[in-house]
Amino acid sequence: EWFHENIVERLRGPSYPYYHRKFNPVKTIDECEIDDKVCFYEANQAYERDKRIDTIILDILFTRAARCSIYEGKLDQDTTCRKELDDLFQARCNYYQKYGEMGVPHSVIDAYMKQKHHMVYMRRHPDYDFTGIDDQRKFEQERKANMKKIRQPLH
């Protein structure tokens, strides 16, 4: 133990906790100059990379929620899979707020304008529930109540 603490730990060097590729930070579209085509291209590439990463994260969360729902069954999934379902719902809402309803050929400028309009709308309507979590909870409670009303066949 003394050998490990005094010699091995000193010779080991710094630990590397990151296993994923780290990209150098580039300017966002609001930091670019008006006629800077290179900055626009880099910001657009970073936006597309972030969109691909968000899509992969959404797929992973969907797979986790689906596996939990299959494992727990239809009646118990609302209670035991609550964390996975909430994470998936929140990620879908965030993905929709960031990338939804922009059309197929869109760029980082379209996303920036959508973000600007969303912030203006939030300022004018501060009490509006953008995620719809209350409606989702009400729908899940009604579905669970209806599932309990259905007679299950005896085995």
Image (spheres, grey):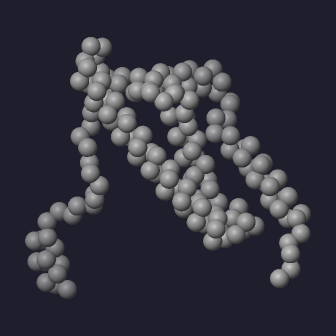
Kindly identify the residue that appears in the image at 64 percent across and 65 percent down.
69
Nearer to me, 56 or 132: 56
Q: Position of residue 44 (x, y in %)?
A: 34, 30
Which quadrant: the C terminus?
bottom right
Q: Is residue 13 above or below residue 130?
A: below
Which quadrant: the N terminus?
bottom left
Kindly identify the residue that appears in the image at 49 percent across and 56 percent down.
60
Q: Position of residue 81 (x, y in %)?
A: 64, 63
Q: Is residue 86 above or below residue 49?
A: below
Q: Is residue 80 above or below residue 95?
A: below
Kindly identify the residue that appears in the image at 23 percent across and 61 percent down.
16
Q: Mark yes or no: residue 119 visible.
A: no
Nearer to me, 134 or 62: 62
Q: Position of residue 13 (x, y in %)?
A: 14, 66
Residue 95 is left or right of residue 81, and the answer is left
Q: Position of residue 151 (x, y in %)?
A: 89, 69
Residue 83 is left or right of residue 46, and the answer is right
Residue 137 is left or right of residue 19, and the answer is right
Outermost residue toward the front?
A: 104
